[in-house]
Every structure is written in C-alpha cells, then in structure tokens.
Image (cartoon, helix red, strand yellow):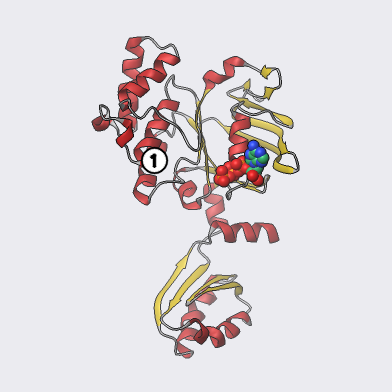
Amino acid sequence: MNLTSAIACEGLSKRYKDVVALNDLTLSVPYGAIFGFLGRNGAGKTTTMRLLAGLAIPSAGRAWIAGRETTQTASGSANSLARTQFGYLPQDPAFYTWMSAREYLDYIGQIQGLAPDERKRQIAELLDLSDLKDAAKRRIGGFSGGMLQRLGIAQALIGHPPVLLLDEPTSALDPAGRREVLDMIARLQGQTTVFLSSHILTDIERVCDTLAVLHKGQLILVSGRDELLEKYAVNAAEIEFDTPADALMPLLETLRALPWVASLTQDGATLRLLVHDLARAKQELLPLIVAHHLPLNRYAWVRPTLEEIFLQLSTS
Ligand code: ATP
C-alpha cells in the first residue's frame, strides 16, 4: 500500500483530550517533491510531523514513508526499518554545543553504524552541501541560528535517507539565515524528497513545488505552487499615508462603497486593500487618493498575505 508515494497518510488524526490537533489528514507526496506544509501557529504542523515520523501515537489513521509504515502504536512502531527511510529535524533541535560541526556529524554517523570511511565521505559531502566547510572545526556553541539549522539538516541527511522531514527550519531565523537555509533545501531538489513545514508563505513559495495548507488541524488546500500563485496573484495594495489616521475617514468611506474593493483594513496611517479587479483598481485607486488630498509615503501592489489567503479560502 502506498508504495508509489514518498510520504503518505490516510485518515491521520490526533486528539489531546478536547483539542483536535489533527483531523483526518489524507495526503500523498510524490518522490522528488519539495513539499511545503503551511499553517499558522497551532495549526497542527508539528503534530503531523511527529505522527509521520512515528514519534506520536495517532488517535486514528496510518502513515507511510518510502512505502514502509511509520505509524506508532501503543506496542511500538509498525515497522522498525521505516526509521532508516527518513531524516527528521525537529522545530527546536538540541546540539552538543561543545562539539565541532565535524565531530557532531561524525557522532551521528557512528550512532547510525556507518563505517569510518563512509562517515568521512558523507561528512565531507554534507559540510559542502550545508556550506559549513569553513566552520567544520568550530564549536557548535558559537554558531548562528542559520548555521545551526543547516547543521541540523546535514545531520538529518546522514545515511542518505530518501525523505527529509523539516519542522519549521526557518521560523526562528533572520532574513539572511532564512535565505541560507532555503538555499540549502533548494540544493536537495532531485536528490531527496523534502517535507517542510512553515507559517511563512514566502519561504514555502521560494523552494516548494507543491504545498498544502493546514488550518486548525484541517487540510484546506493542496496545490502546485505555480497554480496557487496564479490563483492568488498580486491583488493587494498597501498604502502608507503621511497623515494622522483620522484624516483617512472620508477616503475609507469612498473605498468601502466601490465594487472592486474586496476588503479593507486600516492600521494607523496604513491601509491595505484586497481587490477583485486589479486592472480597474490600478487605474482608479491613485486618482482617488489624490482627489482626497492625502500625502503619501508609500504605495505598492503586493501578494496577499497567508492570512488573507486563508480568509479567501474559508469564505470561498
Ligand atoms: P507551532 O507553529 O506553534 O508549533 P503547529 O502548527 O506545529 O504550531 P501543533 O504544535 O501541532 O501546531 O499543535 C496543534 C494543536 O494541538 C495546538 O492547539 C496545540 O496547543 C495542541 N497540542 C499540541 N501538542 C499537545 C499536547 N502534547 N497536549 C495538548 N495539546 C497539544
């Protein structure tokens, strides 16, 4: 069953007393995909990862990785061989901070029973892939957040598992750290199937070819990245005024009455609009602002946020 998917689950559910952390998740991830698993804090991403990895017992459902069942039961894992089929990086990985990066990778290789020559070969390859060659002899304790996550991904790749589960590897990082980690993940394309969770749409967009959206434990969308971007193309305007917020009232009233305005939010002197008709909005919005004699700091057309996509999904 599910021999053709890198990752598969059927009816996977997890309930903690009265909290339904994950409800009836059925999903199939093809080999070679870089699959983005998107959801807000508390959506159930970590729960899903842990169920897929056989680290938690589901309330219902089953999971497979590379054709081997990973479902954990009260009497143990369904298939101990399954553990060799994937690498897993938890959301808050712990490292032995006194070790160097090379020592740490060697230690993980030893735990996995790799022969010294094989460890040496894989460590050289992984230090290269993670761009940590120059830091190989440095103590992990001095690493930046981005370096730690890249080392975490490298350790998860020891033994060349066909599947990699990465739980929010970018969420605690600054933009530079995030870019480095995403670049490393992009380098895995074609070698390893990656299942990557995040609450940051732009991160998922950058590296994933397919994505799923989880909302309050419920799968609400699975889509190719390009299809989603096409569907949710740039249709939001962000306008920052150089005026007190009160001065925007007349403009807000005018905008609310327009048929092409889908939604309107105000945060101080900044307005954000979602529009139904982009061409018309691009023609009419700026003249309207000018007609209200409002001084502008910034005017930009951007993609909808994850929040706005969620809203559109839950109302469509
Ligand atoms: P985050 O990005 O904040 O880690 P997440 O999408 O990974 O969020 P989960 O950690 O899977 O979400 O949590 C999903 C829901 O299950 C939340 O409501 C959470 O409070 C609840 N939950 C998770 N683990 C437990 C637990 N051990 N006991 C009780 N409730 C839990």
Which class describes the residues within 10 Å of circle 1: few (<14), some (14-19), or many (20+)?
Answer: many
- Residue 10 % position (x, y): 71, 32
Q: Is residue 223 left or right of residue 270?
A: right
Q: Is residue 197 left or right of residue 112?
A: right
Judged from the image, the quadrant occupied by ligand 1 is: top right
Task: Give the residue type that dot 1 points to.
Answer: Val
**SS state under label 1:** helix
Residue receiving disc 1: 181
Outermost top residue: 115
Q: Is residue 144 left or right of residue 157?
A: left
- Residue 162 % position (x, y): 50, 24
- Residue 71 % position (x, y): 66, 24
Residue 215 vs 66, above or below: the answer is below
Q: Residue at x 64, y 60 (%)?
A: 311
Q: Quadrant of the N terminus?
A: top right
Residue 64 vs 294, above or below: the answer is above
Asked where in the image residue 137 lies, by quadrant, the reply is top left
